[in-house]
Image: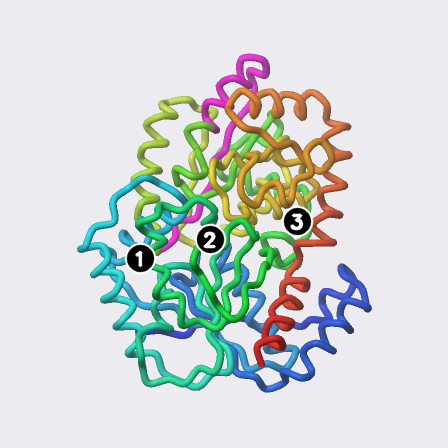
């Protein structure tokens, strides 16, 4: 049932000019006692969303420092991913029912994947609720240490969903959460780790992009790079509040008539709800020629890079957010992001210093206008934002965190 994801090789030394010799040496020292350790990462999709992007870099870097690391994706049909999207929403606190049929679908696919799960591993890291039952259901494999990694905001979960999934998490040796506030009630494991997500500063999405090339990319999408531009890059999802972003744009347009809005997303296999929410967003946007609703079913790294580089203001108006790597990406490009004051976004944005935090549509519109009307101040905040990412949210730090966790579980 599970299938392996092939990743391109990466070398840790390539990051030396960004993070420095001392950091590279520290990572090598941590990795040395783990040389040859067999590590498996398992998640629900090889494309779309922050987890897949992290694994595209984390897995080859683990290999480069001497671990035997690989990445596999579970198998599932549309009925399963509809249910797991409901689990995602429920665990983030949405008020929706958890039916016996939903429970059975989740159990059935986890059981099938668990029974087909082969191999021997020192550490198996299972990402998010979709495959969380792998540890619970026996199969033809041997794993010394199981780790569950949650990337979502479970600070105020719908009790029905949390109570259902908790027994499936108890057999794990450790769990990783993005913030201490996300650790759910009743979860008693050997180790609970707090680990921030990260970006790869050398990936096509985050690496240097010539200004002329970026402008050509946006022009090819029908966007005028010479007019004021605000953007949000996120899945079409109620938690990302694209309808609220359109409201913000409409308020801003009253004072900046030439402003354009771009919403951009990649459509992930494990998010069938995204198509319905895209339809609703299109309906809400109407026929405004200055609203661009873009979606991709392929790699869109260069489009994201160009949009984040050339936007006058980047928004992330989430109403619930595990962390928000799109915020990190934009900050790395020197943007003062206007972000919802929720979840992991305040972990990144220091309000008034590296960006602006907002609580509603009106505050968001005021903040966007402030940055549009004060470009020098926006640039100052953007410079500090990039430095904050360099110090805290790069993939090299993430690799160190995992190596430290593995060592603590030996």
Secondary structure beneath dot 3 equals loop
For discs 1 and 3, the disc positioned in front in the rendered view: 1
What residue range appears in magenta? 245-269
Q: Which is more toward the observer, 146 or 218?
A: 146
Residue at (47, 36) in percent of width and height: 319
Q: How many marks?
A: 3
Judging from the image, the colouring scheme is: rainbow
88 sits to left or right of 210: left
Q: Residues within 10 Å of mark 3 (few under 14, many from 20)?
A: some
The residue wearing badge 1 is: 164
399 sits to left or right of 267: right
Residue 49 - label: 2
Q: In x, y percent, where is residue 346?
A: 62, 40
The residue wearing badge 3 is: 209
Secondary structure beneath dot 1 equals helix
Residue at (54, 28) in percent of width and height: 359
Distance of label 3 from label 2 (alpha carbons) = 22 Å
Q: Which is more toward the observer, 367 or 342?
A: 342
Q: Quadrant of residue 23?
A: bottom right
Q: In x, y percent, where is residue 46?
A: 43, 63
31 sits to left or right of 218: right
Task: Name above or below for residue 192 compared with residue 62.
Answer: above
Sequence order check, earlier mark of 2 and 1 = 2
Residue at (41, 29) in percent of width and height: 243
Q: In x, y percent, where is residue 33?
A: 67, 84
Task: Name above or below for residue 56 compared with residue 339.
Answer: below
> Magenta stretch: residue 395 in it?
no
Sequence order check, earlier mark of 1 and 3 = 1
């Amino acid at each position: 049932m599970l299938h392996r994801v092939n990743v391109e090789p990466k070398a840790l030394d390539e990051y030396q000019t960004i993070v420095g010799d001392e950091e590279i040496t520290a990572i090598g020292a941590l990795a040395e006692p783990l040389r040859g350790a067999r590590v498996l990462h398992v998640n629900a999709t090889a494309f779309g969303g922050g987890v897949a992007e992290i694994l595209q870099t984390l897995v080859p870097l683990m290999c480069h420092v001497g671990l035997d690391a690989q990445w596999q994706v579970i198998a599932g049909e549309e009925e399963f991913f509809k249910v797991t999207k409901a689990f995602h929403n429920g665990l983030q606190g949405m008020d929706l029912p958890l039916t016996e049929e939903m429970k059975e679908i989740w159990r059935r696919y986890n059981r099938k994947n668990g029974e087909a799960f082969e191999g021997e591993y020192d550490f198996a890291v299972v990402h998010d609720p979709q495959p969380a039952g792998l540890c619970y259901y026996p199969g033809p494999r041997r794993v010394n240490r199981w780790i569950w990694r949650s990337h979502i905001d479970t600070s105020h979960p719908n009790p029905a969903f949390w109570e259902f999934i908790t027994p499936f998490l108890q057999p794990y040796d450790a769990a990783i959460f993005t913030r201490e506030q996300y650790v759910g009630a009743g979860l008693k494991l050997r180790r609970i780790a707090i680990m921030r997500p990260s970006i790869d500063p050398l990936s096509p999405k985050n690496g240097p992009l010539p200004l002329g090339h970026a402008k050509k990319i946006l022009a090819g999408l029908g966007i005028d790079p010479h007019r004021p531009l605000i953007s949000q890059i996120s899945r079409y999802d109620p938690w990302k509040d694209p309808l609220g972003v359109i409201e913000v744009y409409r308020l801003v347009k009253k004072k900046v008539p030439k402003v354009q809005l771009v919403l951009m997303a990649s459509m992930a296999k494990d998010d069938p709800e995204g198509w319905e929410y895209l339809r609703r967003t299109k309906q809400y946007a109407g026929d405004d020629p200055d609203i661009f609703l873009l979606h991709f079913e392929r790699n869109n790294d260069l489009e994201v890079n160009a949009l984040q580089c050339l936007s006058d203001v980047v928004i992330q108006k989430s109403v619930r957010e595990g962390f928000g790597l799109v915020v990190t990406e934009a900050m790395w490009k020197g943007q003062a992001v206007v972000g919802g004051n929720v979840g992991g976004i305040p972990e990144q944005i220091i309000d008034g210093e590296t960006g602006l935090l907002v609580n509603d549509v009106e505050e968001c519109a005021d903040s966007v206008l402030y940055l549009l009307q004060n470009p020098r101040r926006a640039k100052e905040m953007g410079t500090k934002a990039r430095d904050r990412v360099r110090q805290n949210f790069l993939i090299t730090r993430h690799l160190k965190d995992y190596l430290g966790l593995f060592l603590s579980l030996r």
